[in-house]
Image (cartoon, rainbow, N blue to C red):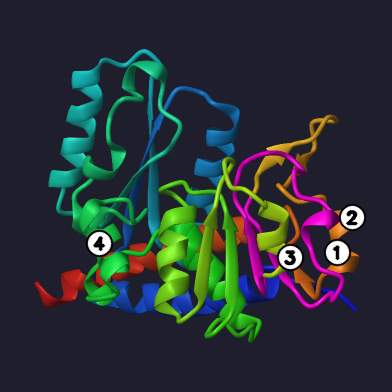
Amino acid sequence: MTQILSSAPIKKKITKELKGECKFLKEKGITPYLKVVLVGNNPASLVYTSSKKKYCERIGAKCDIIALEENISLKEFLDTVADINNDPEVHGCIIQLPLPKHLSHLDVGKLVVQEKDVDGFHPDNLYSVLANQDIQNHFVSCTPKGIITLLQENQIEIKGKRVAIIGRSMIVGKPLACLFTNHDATVTLCHSKTNNLRQITKESDIVVCAIGIAQMVDETYFSDKKNQVVIDVGMNEDAQGELCGDVQFEKVQNHVAAITPVPGGVGPMTIISLAQNLLQASKKRLSL
């Protein structure tokens, strides 16, 4: 029977741990504090930022959403981020993507200072993952970190496994490839121009779908052995406007050993990872 890799039991366990850590920090006079910069009224962004705020507050942390007008000037936007960078009371900052067209040229990974970059996009944080060193003083990108946690909590072996990742973004695909490699997996990083994609996925033990195309991946991407693990990172809308992943769940689930649902799979793990990074950033204040 196919194992459904729901994040719910993991979230329950880790939330309890984070509440304890947050309580300890507050007893030491440190209240973990996150600021989320939101520009405009993108419906998906509004949902994502609200979810992040609710979860941070659930564990006892503080989270403010800095809502900026869609047509905010470049200077005002950069000044807002700079103020957060310079605020000693704030431990973490994230800039919600996507940004409006007139700000889309900005390299968001370089805007937030490394020690507050709880999204894990800063070059120094990305390099620590690439080099597999000094992780304690850097942050791992939230979605890749959440995927590794999801596998580990379900006792799914990573070491020695063949992994295919469909999608090469800086947010998921590339940092995740490094993380899997750091855990001794052999990774094939695929994308829209990859030849023989189905052959690669059929020969892989773990397949991560993060290409952002609704229900692109069907049962023809998997072997007949029914022993593969599928991680669906997609957050898309189907023809009926319902939330769906990159994988055709109903068609694929009976052809694999384990699969994440959408919703209820990778999404909550990303928010959990964000909270873990925030507390990691807050703990550094204990040594100041």
Instruction: Give the residue pinned by disc 2.
Output: 250
Numbered disc total: 4
Name the amino acid type tagged 3: Lys
Residue segment shown in magenta: 204-233
Report the Cα–Cα distance between label 4 and label 1.
36 Å
Report the Cα–Cα distance between label 1 and label 2.
6 Å
Q: Which mark is residue 253?
A: 1
Q: Quadrant of the C terminus?
A: bottom left
Report the Cα–Cα distance between label 4 and label 3.
31 Å
Is any part of residue 57 visible from this angle?
no
Q: Earlier in the sequence, mark 1 or mark 3?
A: 3
Q: Residue furthest left?
A: 288
Name the amino acid type tagged 2: Glu
Crowding near the residue tagged with mark 1, few <14, some 14–19, many ≥20 C-alpha atoms within 10 Å? many
Q: Position of residue 279 (x, y in %)?
A: 34, 68
Instruction: Give the residue pinned by disc 3.
Output: 202
Give the answer, above or below, for where 144 lies relative to 37: below
**Taken as a whole, is the magenta stretch helix, strand or loop?**
loop
Q: Earlier in the sequence, mark 4 or mark 1?
A: 4
Report the Cα–Cα distance between label 1 and label 3.
15 Å
**Secondary-structure class at tag 3:** helix
Q: Tell me the residue at 77%/57% (across/down).
A: 221
Name the amino acid type tagged 1: Gln
Q: Give whichever of 260, 41 is nearer the camera.
A: 260
Q: Earlier in the sequence, mark 4 or mark 3?
A: 4
Q: Earlier in the sequence, mark 2 or mark 3?
A: 3
> Would you say residue 231 sits in the magenta stretch?
yes
In contact (CB < 8 Å): disc 2 and disc 4 = no
Instruction: Give the residue pinned by disc 4.
Output: 127
Is any part of residue 126 visible from this angle?
yes
Q: Tell me the residue at 65%/48% (across/down).
A: 234
